[in-house]
Image (cartoon, helix red, strand yellow):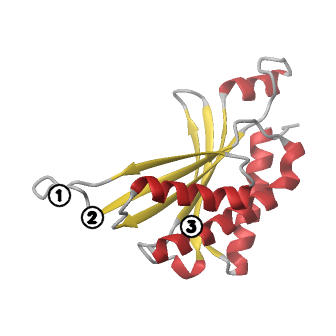
Amino acid sequence: MFHPLVFDNIRVVLEGAVYDRDFDGAITITNRSDVMDMATFQRLFQIDFKLAEYAESDQGVRAQMQLRTSLGDVAAEQLETPLVEHIGCTICIHFYMQLEKPGDIPNSAKEITAILNDIWGERPYITQTLSAKLPEHRIEWPPPSWENRVTLDFHRKIDEGNIDDLRLLIEHTIQSLVGLQNYVDQT
């Protein structure tokens, strides 16, 4: 009999819990993908969403939850051989936001980190990646806006023993969306 992978079990629960929040009207799912990378034999599931009232807004902060597993994890699970230290998958959360007239970038980055640390209790490792689009014939410096990708990385694998934690993870993600959206709206 076919036994689903740890990745598949977690993906089904994660996806279902996010869709539950969409059906509740708290968020709107804007994209999802389930990818098998044949070059590296990795699996990736990601689901994107915004707060429901910002679903159509370009200024709406977007969350993206990513679940990954590698060839080593899949092979160890299927072969029942200890090829990796701990069989499981990783979860990472990204937030994408437009910073219009960002002013002082270092202070903005500190404020964003503080918002997230208040919600997550300084648990995940937070990085921010800023980018600006510079059209070919209209290069302005400094650019009028920046896209900030904020990444929360937990630096550990999860397995079926963590399934009960997924709803709390989603709630923290939604709280983060609210806090980051309030920040964007005030700047």
Locate the N terminus by quadrant.
top right
What residue is disc 1 on? 140
Residue holding disc 2: 144
Q: In which quarter of the image is the C terminus?
A: bottom left
Tell whether label 2 touches label 1 (CB within 8 Å).
yes
Say which residue appears at 27% left-offset and 64% top-offset.
144
> At label 2, which amino acid type do we have?
Pro
Q: Which mark is residue 180?
A: 3
Q: Where is residue 182 in the image (x, y as percent from the top left)?
A: 55, 75
Residue 127 rendering spot, x and y as whole percentages: 54, 45
Residue at image point 24% right, 56% down = 142
Helix, strand, or loop for circle 3?
helix
Identify which residue is drawn at 81% across, 27% down.
86
Q: Secondary structure beneath disc 1?
A: loop
Q: Give the residue displayed 46% in from the left and 63% down from the top.
A: 97
Q: Distance between the residues labelled 1 and 2?
A: 8 Å
Q: How far apart are marks 2 and 3 (CA)?
A: 19 Å
- State whether residue 173 is above or below residue 60: above
Nearer to the camera, 174 or 21? 174
Q: How far apart are marks 3 and 1 (CA)?
A: 27 Å
Q: Is residue 136 left or right of residue 19?
A: left
Instruction: Please state which amino acid type lies under the numbered disc 3.
Output: Leu
**Tag 1: Cα neighbours inside 10 Å, few (<14), some, or many (≥20)?**
few
- What amino acid is at disc 1? Glu
Tag 3 and tag 1, C-beta contact below 8 Å: no
Q: Where is residue 36 in the image (x, y as percent from the top left)?
A: 59, 38
